[in-house]
Image: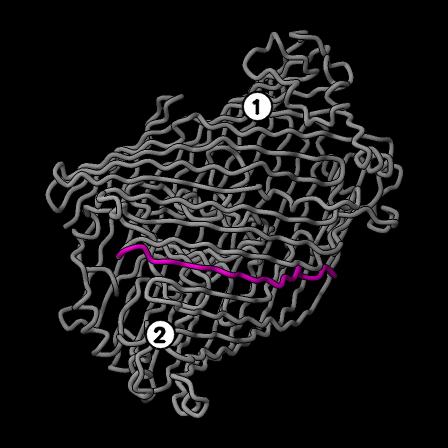
Amino acid sequence: MYMIRKNTLHALLLSSCALAVPGLGSAQSVQGASVSDNSASQSSTATQKADKTRQDEATDLKAVVVASGITYRSHIDVPAPKLTYSKQFFAKFEPVSVGDQLRRVPGVAFVGDIGESVAPELRGLGHGYTQILVNGRPVPGIGNDRSVAVDRIPAEIVDHIEIIRSPTADMDSQGIGGTINIVLKDGATLPPGVIVRVGETWDKKTGKYRPNAALSWSGQNDAKTVFYSLTLDAQKRFNEKHSVQGVFEDDSQGFAEEVAAGGMGRSLQSWDDRSRSTAVEREEQGDQRESKDISFNGDLTWNLSKQSTLRLDAYALSTRRDEHENTDVYEGDGTPGGFDSIDHKYEDVSTDEDSRGLSATFYSTFGDLTSIEAYLGRDSINGGETKYKYKHTADNLDKIEATSADDDDWQADVAITRQMPGFAEALGMMGAELKFGIQAKNKNRDFDQYTNDVGDDTLTDGSFNYKEHRVDGYARIKWFFNPAVTLATGVRWENTRTKQRFINTVTNGGTVTDKQTGSADSKVSMLNPSAHLQWRVSDTDQIRFSVARTVRRPSIDQLVPATVVESPEDYSVTVGNPDLEMERSLGFDLGYERTLGKKGVIGVNLFTRKISNLIGLVKTDRPVSDVGQDPNDYPGGLYTYKNIGDAKVHGVELDLSTPLSFLGWDHTGIFGNYTRLFSSRPDPVTGRDIEINDQPTYVYNVGVTQDIPSWNASLGASYQRQGMSRFVTIGEMESTKFDGNLEIFIEKRFGDSFILRLTGTNLLDACSYQMEPNFDGDSSAEILANQAAFNVDAYEVERECSSPRWSLTFRAVF
């Protein structure tokens, strides 16, 4: 894993320039792998001064874990727009996973099943728009869309989380929406000791209990030249969902009026009273998901000399998940309660995922002005999902669908940082710092999927291998004009080569009836500049302005030229496009931040992103025979992914985290953030501008925490909510609305070593609502025409709710 710390070079720069630049005057250790603009400050745990600073600043572990008082957002003094939240900020609500933690930071939305926090979307932009880093480095995900399931990462192993709104040149340009850096615990900055956590979670609807436990151990040798930490975590996660879905067509009472009004179908649904429903088909479903996560995270740091440090990091994470769906299906005539038949469907889903990582980082200084850092690391993930679908009875297997992926990523890089006091003095500045480096990355991904139609003994296999080779170089200069103004400018060159190989087969009764193979290669290079200005207007106020070019790489299955039948609609075919270009964005951020007292902070940030080469699904003029399919079997035509135009995203982000000391309430703290989002993109169906898929109109969360010193106790509450979002593609238009999530905690501290917390989540029985008008026709052209004219063939309307959960957690520090 990649770990960055502040070092003595800032102090050396200070000495050489004989000037006092804020943030440059001391050698100090920053917990974890901070992706920071202070990149000259990296990994100098080797020096005696850093050792002395660590001893001076080290906090007793008991004071960190069993702490009274309230923790607020960290203050960061760097040019790039970045927010940092320590583990103490989240700890009182006892989050289970990183997904739970991210629900309390600005601008993060989740689109998916209720009660799940899987793939975070910064500024409401998902599917590759949000870059996920662990300890400053990208990690692979199990899906082809390059997303990372953060609900698998236990909160217990996290030190702090960074929200990076705009990248510097020494960061990967991926992440148009922004970057989330998850920094794991670090033995070189943790006080020595042992933390033990045990707990249990109770699900209200099912009455079931799920245990969890963790052990953290950090320490150092007597000479303070070796530092280490180890965290083991085992937990069970449980989510019970229940949903009601209705399909409404011409025969349904009120259907014509809903279409005429341009509605989305929600007014037609009767959620809890089947006798009032006018659906022609109604499904009532129960869904239980049970996950088991076992994780290990460890690091070991050697101070090899006064100038050099070697650090080893390793992690392993295993997830096993079982899901069971039980669905009652009612057929009706469109009159209230007019259901005349009932059927049953069952589905069992088994999911396995294993992630591993191992890395080494070497850091050394040469003289007073130069440092070098070298990194070598490997991250991998493998696993799969198997669905067993049953008809009518729980033992009548109808279909098996399975996918598996094996993704292996290697990265090696070298960076050199050079202080340039003479150059700065010649230009009349306080100081200047040059950082340049090169990074090599290699991704090798194998993906397999198959469908077995048990009834007619048909087996469909599809697999591909995807290789991605990258060589990136960058240079960045930080200009210290005066104590108030700092500018970081840089450029990043990214060079990417891909190779793709695929094979699809169809077997019936043991005989291969169809087989397709193919391959494709591509190569692309680009330059991505960036600049970040920080102006310290006063001791309490600062303004930041950033501009950066970022990219979004296509989903891997969009690139591989394999065919998918019955997609996007029945009787049609979709094929990948290896010639897809990356989406590119030019982004601007303008932010103001004010310090409130010693601990509080309030900030506002305006942002805009202009995205070019937007990727969309379009219908081609080519016959399906071009991809080996029979036109008589697929008269709907051939679809593919293309770069279809431009998009714009803009919004405003507000965040506040402060004690209410100005009201005389020193033991009361509030936190909150609100992000208002706007976007526009061309609709491939109508040509009109619509929102980017799945982007909510707003995201906010607010909370209050009260410390009661006389009782040695604390309590608090948090409420999160996001606005309506839409997903539009060929043949369908889906709108999604989420209820808000209320969380509370009550904690009691026993001495300076023990703490007991009771936490509750989803206490308002939150639900999600999906409204989906569908459009039909005898051909794809007719479907598109009906969609453009909003001639609705049917409405699918669904409500999905999750159960409240309570957790009791006990922590001890030794």
Q: Amino acid at mark 1?
A: Tyr
Looking at the figure, which quarter contains the N terminus? bottom left
Distance (Cα) linking label 1 and label 2: 56 Å
- 486 lies above or below 607: below
The span picked out in magenta is 579-597
Please indicate whether residue 806 sits to the left or right of residue 175 in the image.
Answer: left
> From where the camera sits, is residue 152 visible?
no
Badge 2 element: loop
Q: What percent of the width, then of the height, locates residue 82?
A: 43, 60
**Hey, which residue is sitting farthest left in the picture?**
751
Determine which quarter of the picture holds residue 272: top right
- Which residue bears the numbered disc 1? 346
- Which residue bears the numbered disc 2? 41
Magenta residue check for 484: no
Q: What percent of the width, then of the height, locates residue 18?
A: 30, 86
Q: Residue at x 52, y 57 (%)?
A: 178
Label 2 neighbour load within 10 Å: few <14, some 14-19, many 20+: many
Q: What percent of the width, then of the height, locates residue 677?
A: 57, 47
Q: Residue at x 44, y 64 (%)?
A: 543
Q: What percent of the width, then of the height, locates residue 381?
A: 49, 53
Please indicate whether residue 803 sits to the left or right of residue 283 in the image.
Answer: left
Label 1 neighbour load within 10 Å: few <14, some 14-19, many 20+: many
Q: Amino acid at mark 2?
A: Ser
Q: Nearer the viewer, mark 1 or mark 2?
A: 2
- 462 lies above or below 416: above
Which numbered disc, 1 or 2, marks the residue that appears first in the sequence?
Answer: 2
Please indicate whether residue 231 sits to the left or right of residue 442 in the image.
Answer: left
Q: Residue at x 25, y 81 (%)?
A: 305
